[in-house]
Amino acid sequence: APANASALPATDAERGTGQPGMLYRDLAACNVFDVMARMGELSLPTLIIVGADDKLTPVKYARYLHEHLPGSTLHIIPDAGHYVMREQPEAVNAALEAWLRR
């Protein structure tokens, strides 16, 4: 998220360079993973946390999950992008704590 752009260099540094082709393999695996037709089989409580400014997995996908997973809880965290746990750790922790209390 633009509000947290200063966190990106530290995130990149922690991630490291990895092995050649690792990012490609990761993205290719994500591209073919599709269990949307089986979502109705899930019956466990589910917390969906998404950053309001996430460009990689936008809020519309989190809303879709929430609409198709019975009993799910959706929590959209403002001023956070794809690295929501790094960008807004206190808000993520608060959402987890509130959900676990229920």
Image (cartoon, rainbow, N blue to C red):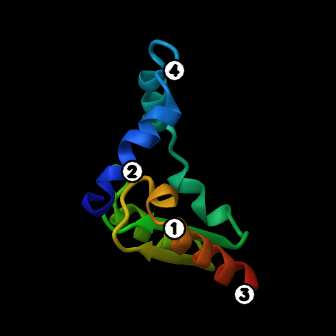
* On screen, residue 71 above or below 30: below
Q: Nearer the viewer, residue 25 or 88?
A: 88
Q: Amino acid at mark 2?
A: Ala
Is residue 3 rendered to the left or right of residue 101? left
Q: Amino acid at mark 1?
A: Ile
Is the Cβ of the residue at disc 1 closer than 8 Å to that at disc 3?
Answer: no
Q: Nearer the viewer, residue 80 or 47?
A: 80
- In the rendered image, is residue 45 in sight? yes
Distance Cα–Cα, label 3 vs label 2: 32 Å
Q: Nearer the viewer, residue 82 or 36?
A: 82
Check the image and name the residue furthest to the left: 2
Q: Which residue is mark 4?
A: 18
On residue 101, which mark appears? none
Q: Which residue is mark 1?
A: 49
- Is disc 4 placed on a helix, strand or loop? loop
Of tags 4 and 1, the one toward the viewer is 4
Residue 56: x, y in percent?
34, 49
The answer to which of marks 2 and 1 sits earlier in the sequence is 2
Q: Amino acid at mark 3?
A: Arg
Q: Amino acid at mark 4?
A: Gly
Quadrant, the N terminus: bottom left
On residue 102, which mark appears? 3
Within 10 Å of disc 2 (Cα), the crowding (few <14, some 14-19, many 20+) is few
